[in-house]
Image (spheres, rainbow, N blue to C red):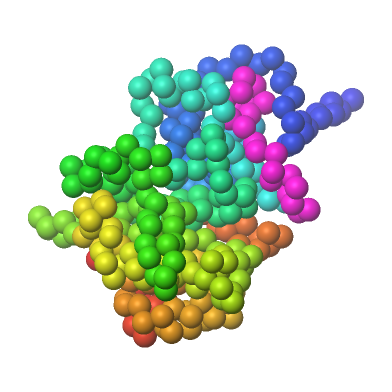
């Protein structure tokens, strides 16, 4: 008689009481999720490697048995969730494990558990994008990913910025109004050529198409308002004054080519130095679309610029 094996639910824990012996790769997974607020199983596999099927099984075990990993409940609200790779985050025992091992690394994003401001879909897209870029960096030994904690830890960064609760907040005055701006992410890339090192730093903005490009009043939220604030940041070199950075490029990832062109046109009308503004459209931002591939495409595919040739992040 055949034995029927009942599959455990993806949406809630169902422990079998299995005793876990943690492996070195488990620790690598915990470290990875200590850096990224959320990661899909496909991206976890792209980082840690190994047999994909066995990794998926192991992730399930670390979720169901002992509370090392969590599957955030927000992902199940999407109608096609059962056909999507599961999204994971670090849970209490996983965090405790890497703390005891003394191997925790600096976070790639500031999307912490406490006081997260962004909606789940927005936060997940930020993590998807940064993970794609970091995968590209890992593929090239002449490149190195610089997370925001390293930027704040630099001796060039003023002490007040390091101690601030909002270390990457910019405040500018434009068109008679005070504008406040916090990027979705800030990171850098180190480029090595022979004995010489150069750097590019980036502020990432993920636009899911829910914000109007232009509103009647500047006091209302719009993407044009955000572009105006970035125009002032780049023109006044506030990134240099506040963090000691040599440059700052603004990345906008948005939905569809038509929306991208509308945003780029709005930028062109602001009189900004458009060299520092990079744009890319992707259908992956659609809530019910296919999940983004766990590849380094954000690193190697060109980003568009208004009035200037496209630029790839891999090029110094």
Residue at point 52%, 61% (across, down): 206
Does the magenta segment cover residue 72? yes
User: Which stretch appears magenta?
Assistant: 61-82
Badge count = 0
Residue at point 38%, 65% (across, down): 173
If the image is split into quadrants, where does the N terminus sit?
A: top right
Estimate the x, y position of residue 235 in percent, counting from the top left: 29, 70
Camera-nearest residue between 59 and 35: 35
For this orientation, the residue located farthest to the right is 1
Above or below — where is 193 with respect to 25? below
Camera-nearest residue between 242 and 183: 242
Residue at point 35%, 59% (across, down): 202
Above or below — where is 283 with respect to 149? below
Image-based side of 92 in relation to 135, left or right: right
Estimate the x, y position of residue 140 in percent, counting from the top left: 30, 55
Does the magenta segment cover residue 282? no
For this orientation, the residue located farthest to the left is 195
Estimate the x, y position of residue 13 in percent, counting from the top left: 72, 27
Q: Is residue 291 visible from the viewing direction of this image? A: yes
Residue at point 31%, 67% (across, down): 234
Camera-nearest residue between 2 and 172: 172
Estimate the x, y position of residue 238 in percent, counting from the top left: 28, 60
Above or below — where is 264 with respect to 29? below
Camera-nearest residue between 296 and 260: 260
Image-based side of 298 in relation to 59, left or right: left
If the image is split into quadrants, where does the C terminus sit?
A: bottom left
């Amino acid at each position: 008689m055949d034995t029927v094996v009942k599959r455990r639910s993806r949406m809630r824990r169902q422990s079998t009481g299995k005793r876990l012996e943690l492996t070195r790769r488990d620790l690598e997974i915990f470290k990875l999720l200590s850096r990224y607020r959320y990661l899909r199983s496909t991206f976890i596999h792209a980082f840690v490697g190994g047999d994909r099927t066995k990794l998926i099984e192991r992730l399930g075990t670390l979720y169901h048995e002992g509370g090392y990993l969590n599957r955030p409940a927000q992902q199940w609200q999407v109608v096609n969730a059962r056909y999507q790779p599961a999204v994971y985050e670090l849970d209490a025992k996983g965090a405790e494990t890497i703390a005891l091992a003394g191997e925790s690394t600096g976070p790639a994003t500031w999307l912490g558990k406490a006081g997260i401001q962004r909606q789940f879909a927005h936060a997940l897209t930020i993590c998807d994008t940064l993970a794609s870029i970091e995968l590209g960096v890992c593929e090239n030994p002449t490149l190195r990913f610089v997370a925001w904690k390293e930027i704040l830890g630099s001796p060039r960064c003023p002490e007040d910025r390091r101690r601030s609760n909002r270390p990457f907040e910019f405040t500018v005055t434009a068109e008679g109004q005070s504008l406040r701006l916090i990027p979705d992410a800030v990171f850098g890339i180190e480029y090595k050529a022979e004995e010489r090192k150069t750097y590019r730093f980036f502020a990432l903005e993920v636009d899911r198409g829910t914000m109007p490009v232009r509103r009647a009043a500047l006091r209302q939220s719009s993407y044009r308002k955000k572009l105006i604030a970035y125009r002032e940041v780049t023109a006044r070199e506030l990134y240099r004054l506040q963090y000691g950075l040599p440059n700052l490029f603004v990345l906008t990832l948005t939905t569809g080519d038509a929306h991208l062109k509308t945003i780029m046109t709005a930028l062109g009308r602001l009189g900004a130095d458009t060299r520092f503004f990079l744009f890319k459209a992707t259908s992956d931002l659609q809530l019910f679309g296919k999940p983004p591939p766990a590849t380094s495409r954000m690193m190697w595919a060109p980003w568009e610029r208004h009035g200037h040739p496209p630029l790839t992040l891999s090029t110094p």
